[in-house]
Image (tube, rainbow, N blue to C red):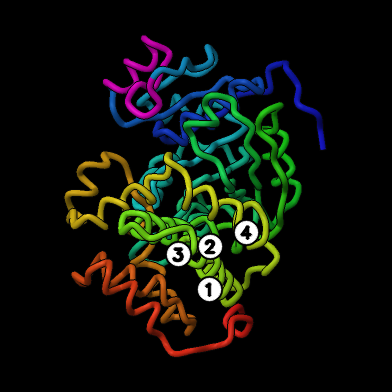
Amino acid sequence: MSQVKSERKGRAAVLVAGSWGTALAAVLAGNGYDVQLWTRSAEHAYKMNASHKNEKYLPGVALPASLHATTDMQEALRDVDLALFVAPSSAMRAVAKQAAPYLAEDALVVHATKGFEADTLKRMTTVLSEELNRPAEKIVVLSGPSHAEEVIRKQPTTVVVASADMNAAEQAQDAFMSTYFRVYTNPDVVGVEVAGAIKNIIALGAGLSDGLGFGDNAKAALLTRGLAEISRLGTAMGANPLTFAGLAGVGDLVVTCTSQHSRNWRAGSMLADGTSLEEVLERMGMVVEGVRTTRAANELAKQYDVQMPITAELYSVLFANNSPKSAVENLMGRLKTHEIEQLG
């Protein structure tokens, strides 16, 4: 693995300018890339360029001088060596379709989005492969326990980059690795993507648990059994079980279920006090991937014939008007079973 260098590395584009996209754009800029940060909003781009901050999503933190915001997709992707897609799962296909005509064939493609496409249940590497007309094996996914609010302030963070093409994974590792942002490689794309998506569902449950006033016992059980659900679906889809014991699995699960920065945790906590899903999403003002992912994962569980009781009960709360307390009672009242058998 190459050491982090301070000289200019080339050009990178980051699509789009939300909190996570902005934080990762700052990592790349700090590592020597000239970064174009794409946003649909002309006002948003103007304010970022004028203030050198993204006050909308990461207020109060200065952005690197080599980071420039733009609404021009062709300008953003001109001569880039690396294109990082951080669009919400619901917008990934549209953003990739818009980017496709301008993206160089030899550019490294990375995504850092945690979710499935709602209608097709496809993982993000598949969506990007289809729209960018390049092999999914060449695409890299970046995931792990990493809140944007901490990364943008250069607090120590460790993530994983996964690709079937280890050369591509190592290129991404070299691009993002820094003194505060440590990057590991992993060939298990399916496991990393599934873990990153499903942990958002468990974080919704953790927020519900805390909002209902349950204690540490309940949360520990939720995280443990949630990890079992992640592993169960992931292995059915072809993932390596060891991935779920790593950064993309238990690491991301813990940080998302316990942190004040977690949108999914906050959304679950708000649902616990009787706030409607529509009002929760309106008040959040940002994408809560766990909501869409719950619907997708509920369908994937049926498709792969795996048991995901936590996901099923959260689905009932989000989309079938079940009360959070009833969902907990249903989970606790399930038929007795063996723990280890359920991990398969």
What residue sits right under mark 1 in the picture? 233
Amino acid type at circle 1 is Leu
Q: Mark 1 touching mark 2, by CB under 8 A?
A: yes
Amino acid type at circle 4 is Val
Q: Could you say whether the residue bearing mark 3 is in a helix, strand or loop?
A: helix
Q: Which mark is residue 194?
A: 2
Q: What whole-number distance in Å separates the C-alpha atoms at marks 4 and 2?
A: 8 Å
In front: mark 4 or mark 2? 2
User: What segment carries the magenta color?
Assistant: 43-59
Q: What whole-number distance in Å separates the C-alpha atoms at marks 3 and 4?
A: 31 Å
Tell me if mark 2 has few (under 14), some (14-19) or many (20+) residues whose alpha carbon lies within 10 angstroms of its own: many
Where, by quadrant of the figure, is residue 30 drawn? Answer: top right
Instruction: Find residue 105 and report its horizontal and vertical position in percent.
Output: 59, 41
Query: Is residue 252 rendered to the left or right of residue 324?
Result: right
Is the residue 75 above or below the residue 51 in the image?
Answer: below
Q: Could you say whether the residue bearing mark 1 is in a helix, strand or loop?
A: helix
